[in-house]
Each structure stands twice: as C-alpha cells, then as structure tokens.
Image: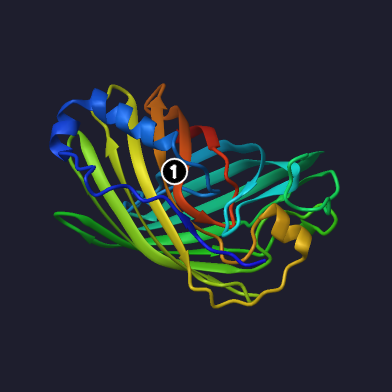
Amino acid sequence: MKLKTNRIIISSDFNLNFFTIMNNFKYFYILVLSLMFCCFSIHKSNAQSAWTKKKGELFSQISYTTIPNYSEIFNENEFFTSRSITDNTIQLYGEYGLNDNLTLLVNVPFKSIKTGDVIENSTLPLSIVEATETRIGNIQVGLKQNIYKGKFVLSGQLNVEANTSTSNLASGIRTGYNAWTFTPTLNIGKGYSNYYFQGFIGADIRTNSYSSNFRIGGEFGLTSIKKTTLAVFVDVVESFNNGDVVLPITSLETALYINNQEYGSFGLKGLYNFTDNFGVSAGFGGAFFANNVAKQAALSVGLFYKI
C-alpha cells in the first residue's frame, strides 16, 4: 500500500486583517467554526503549554474523545475500510508542580475501539472481523522545566510514552503504538490581560522500527469572556519516513497507530469554570492535510479540577 499526504490549498487571496477580526469577536468565531467544519479529524490536536505549575499546584482532567463510525482513510488513494470503525478514548491527565520551575505530567488513555458493520461501498475486500477491544493505550509521563521567565516564557519538555498498548490481528484493532516514544519539545508562550499565545517545536522519536516525526504547533486563546477560555490551535506532524516496520494488512486497513501517520490539524477548544477549581472542557479537531488517519470528525468533552 503506497501512502502519500493529501492537501487542501487555501488561496493566498484569502487575506484577513487579524486585529480587525479580534476587535469583533463574533466574526472571528464564525470564521473558526466555518473552517473547522470544512475539514476532517486526526487523533491528536493540542498545543503544549509553555507555563509550568507553581510548587504544589495540581491540574487534573478526565476527558472523553470519540471518532465515531468512520470508514474513510486519508492516504494517496483514499479508501474505505471493509467495516465501520469507532474509536473512543477515556483519558486521565494530570500536571503537578514539583517546584516553581519543574512540572510532572501524566497521561493515561483507556481505549475502546470497535470494528462494526460491513461497508458495502468498501474499496477493500472483507479482511477484518467484527470485534470490540477495551484496553489501555500508551501511558505517557513527562517533565517540563522552565528555562526563562521575562517578557515571555520559555520551557523545555520531555515526554516518554510507554509501549503499553495491545493489538488484535483478526480485527486490525490497535490501542496504541507498538513502540516507546520519546518526545522532546521547546515551548514558548506570552500572556496578556485578555489573551495569550503559545507554541512548540519538537519531535516524536519511536523505537521498534517506526518512523520518527517532526512536530510544530501553536495556540491562541481568549480569556476575556467571563469564566471562559476559548482557544484555537494548529498542530503539524510530518514523518521523517525513516522507519521500516512491517505491520499486518489488517492494521493498515484500520489505520490505527500505524507507521508514517501525518497531519496538519487545527480546531477549537474551550474551558468553562463553574468555580475557581472546577470546570468543563470541550473541543473539536479538524485537518487541512493528513496521511494514514481517519477522515472523520473528533469530538472531546471533559471535566477538570485544579488546586
């Protein structure tokens, strides 16, 4: 199966005056939603924060993400799987300030993936069985160290993703990468009274003959709305194509955690605080190019608690 990135090109004539848009948030909001609903989903789409927690501070979140009932896959010859697939994740995430400049991060995903009804217009022969797998994904632990605090914030981060996932040959279901992943990033951010910017650059370095990836992304957020933070993000992952792992044909069909996955994603996410310590989050992710990922919208909701 030969794979290649598919891209959507936006005309350079589409020029916007950023500050004019931000002075009238209504039009900015409509623009973001319109762009997002023209795109499709990827599995991950979030910028990494540049700020560390103060000593003893805790941020915890439980979230649910679903990519429901998809069958179309991004690649050179976009194809339909022989069965519909639903990919659900319950994720436990936490950040804790070990001191004012060093933060511990932990992420534990629980996956529930189903291969369901036969797709009549599939471009592939029926090669995967109907099944449901509910297993743990790739557990991730990381450290974020502040480097500079002044006119802006600069931090370095290293995440380690363990090879804790499982796979099922007959159904093609995989709950994560069959590899360890090391993700070093450099994060930068700057906050103002009503908004903030942040961005990151780094790489995913994988074992077991998987290709490594280049990563870059950014986020712009508004904090001027009462009890609410609303943000737009961009996240780009490009494979170095330096891995030669051989995966079963059933895994290639479902496109779950396979080699050389790539995307350029953007989307919208929001936080609403019921109290100073407790609130709800929601997000929607889209892609303007992708390779080896589902062509379907990803929706997320969650609850967070901080002290």
Q: Is residue 173 above or below residue 303?
A: below
103 with respect to 242 (left or right): left
The way the protein has been coloured in the rendering is rainbow
Residue at the image position 69 percent from the left and 65 percent from the top: 178
Residue at the image position 31 percent from the left and 61 percent from the top: 155
Residue at the image position 51 percent from the left and 38 percent from the top: 61
- Residue 101 in view (yes/no): no
Q: Quadrant of the N terminus?
A: bottom right
Q: Residue 91, image x and y in percent?
A: 59, 43
Q: Where is mark 1, residue-wise?
A: 58
Residue at the image position 55 percent from the left and 48 percent from the top: 43
Total labels: the figure holds 1
Kind of residue at disc 1: Leu
Q: Residue 218, image x and y in percent?
A: 32, 51
Q: Quadrant of residue 26?
A: top left
Q: Residue 208, image x and y in percent?
A: 66, 75
Q: Nearer the viewer, residue 300 or 101?
A: 300
171 with respect to 180 (left or right): right
Q: Nearer the viewer, residue 12 or 23?
A: 12
Q: Quadrant of residue 24?
A: top left
Number of other residues with Cα within 10 Å of mark 1, as a class: few under 14, some 14 to 19, many 20 or more: some
Q: Nearer the viewer, residue 15 or 57?
A: 15
Q: Quadrant of the C terminus?
A: top left
SS assignment at label 1: strand
Q: Is residue 62 above or below residue 163?
A: above
Q: Nearer the viewer, residue 187 or 15?
A: 15
Q: Residue 99, image x and y in percent?
A: 36, 56
- Residue 190 in view (yes/no): yes
